[in-house]
Amino acid sequence: MRLRVRPLGDAYVGPSENSEQVDYASQFVVDRRKSLGWISVLPDELILAIINQLPVADLARLSGASLAAHAFANSGNGWKEAVLDAYEKEVGENADSSFPLGDTWRARFQAHVASDGSRHPRKRPRLASRQVVLYSDVLAHLERCARGGVPEEWLSYSNIPRCHGLTAAEFQRRYESSNVPVVITDAARQWPSLEWLHEQCGETRFRLGHREWPLPAYLRYARAMTDCYTDDALLYLFDCRFGEKVPELAQAYTPPRCLDTPDLFALLGEQHRPDYRWLIVGPPRSGSTFHQDPNGTSAWNAVICGRKKWVLLPPGELAPPGVRVMVDADGSRHVLGPATVYEWFVNHYDEMCERRQALRAIETVVNAGEVLFVPRGWWHCAMNLEPVGEWDDGVGVALTQNFCNAVNLPHVLQFLRHSPANVSGVPLARRATLYSEFVQVLQRDCPEMLADAQRRLAALDVRRARSKPSSPFRFGFAAPATSSPPLARETHPDRHLLQAESGLAVVDELTLVAGGQRRSRDAVNGEHRRPRGALLAESKRAPRRRRVARGEFAQPVRKGGSGHAR
């Protein structure tokens, strides 16, 4: 007997075009209510969250309780965390420990840490001809994210300019000053290979989320994930301290020639500047979800081996599809979206393609030896792809570095001054003082550059103040201290920046949070609702759809009446 999980819609309209063909005459559909008992009243997300808290022994017992319990127990993170914990422990005792094999995390656990000490998977029961099906959107989506591939449609479109042989002056004039991304095709051809990286790093431990593994141990995990897709949330090596851990690696590369300009944050000293460079390693389908680079800086990303799919959206636009930005009362921003970059592609890439022109989205595939320039403020995500050609190791490796130079200095200063709650890469206690520290060293070492940046910053503030909308829902840079907190419109070109600077969080269409208090949109703008008679008089002139949109006629309906407002 074989248990399969399918989307709930298949129960009503049959399988989708991408679904595996099933002989419906020979299948048995699991009754969710009977199979799960009283917990069947809970949504699948909550059931899965509860099961994720269970230890392995309880997961094993739950798996034998019923068919639906078996599906939920094997879809959670319990078996995965048990395997990773055991592997991490063995790596600490024996650096050459192999990563367990298997087509599920439970099979990997049985192969690696079985209670009887066996290192071989237990024999599976013989499959019967009848197929068992459980309909669940949540479990089906997890399985798709764990085992799905990368369609060619995701890789076929590219609209980012590509060039080579750029000088620093040409790059600054054509791309950096215009804040436009570009792929530089000849910038990292001679950089060290993965084999050299493996030799130099040795047993140095690198950061993988809340874990730290030696690079060889992580590469064994990554190659196992490449050979058999079983993980819906792949571990991703993303370490900003690699230069301290492996100085030879930091010395083995230099910024691309056209990007090799003085980094002004270096004036603070290596120990006091914000984090600015990262070593990035990951298997196919891993990567970074949508974000904007920290502290108003620009960045470059060099692919050493493998390939990366990039999607970028310009600053000043709304957040990418499927991504929400929440702003707390203190101005700190939180980006909410899919848990992994592959999940974003599965759920929202088609929507982005339909809105590509409106969003002004750009995308491309960056190959080994190429460098992508990511301008300040651009939303971007990157996903590792299966290597091609000579890069057949199965793992993607990249180096990325953020920088502050004379071109983006005004925007960095603006970010540090107006958004201290969003400053990153420094201890929490230094977030509010980083602006004054930075200005002090600039005044000491680069007074002319600082004066020019401050003039440009003042002109930028004036230009933005003049371009603010004329409607009542506007943002004021110079609002009096006694006035209500300003309102950031959903359609304002700098909506997220304005929200971060004002400490205002948009909660829903008609309700706002300002200064920690929940108030209506009219109250935020100092307006009061007019008497009902004035509204009825105005209704003869204003279109009904505009009045309904403003909520002016959200009156109760008389019971038993014809449906007209009282």
Image (cartoon, grey):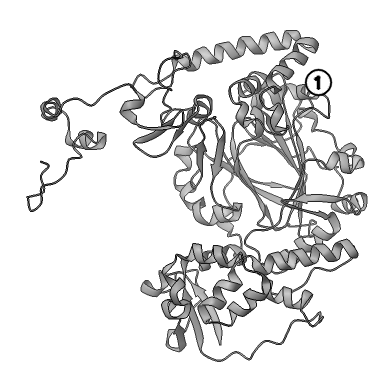
Residue 535 at x, y percent in the picture = 15, 28
The quadrant holding residue 546 is top left
Question: Which residue has dot 1 on it?
Answer: 267
**In this orientation, does residue 180 appear?**
no
Residue closer to the observer: 305 or 103: 103
Residue 33 at x, y percent in the picture = 42, 77
Residue 355 at x, y percent in the picture = 45, 43
Residue 1 at x, y percent in the picture = 56, 88
Q: Amino acid at mark 1?
A: Leu
Whether residue 397 sits left or right of residue 566 in the image: it is right
- Residue at the far left: name it: 561
Against 389, is 244 above or below? Answer: above
Q: Secondary structure at mark 1?
A: helix
The quadrant holding residue 190 is top right
- Image point 59% across, 31% down: which residue? 377
The quadrant holding residue 391 is bottom right
Whether residue 492 sits left or right of residue 60 in the image: it is left
Residue closer to the observer: 100 or 392: 100
Residue closer to the observer: 125 or 35: 35
- Image point 18% across, 37% down: which residue? 553
Q: Quadrant of the C terminus?
A: top left
User: Callout 1: few (<14), some (14-19), or many (20+) C-alpha neighbours within 10 Å?
Assistant: some
- Image point 58% across, 60% down: which residue? 151
Residue closer to the observer: 277 or 522: 522
Against 77, is 125 above or below? Answer: below
Against 8, is 30 above or below? Answer: below
**In this orientation, does residue 445 appear?**
yes
Against 88, is 417 above or below? Answer: above
- Image point 68% across, 33% down: which residue? 424
Whether residue 55 sits left or right of residue 389 in the image: it is left
Total marks shown come to 1
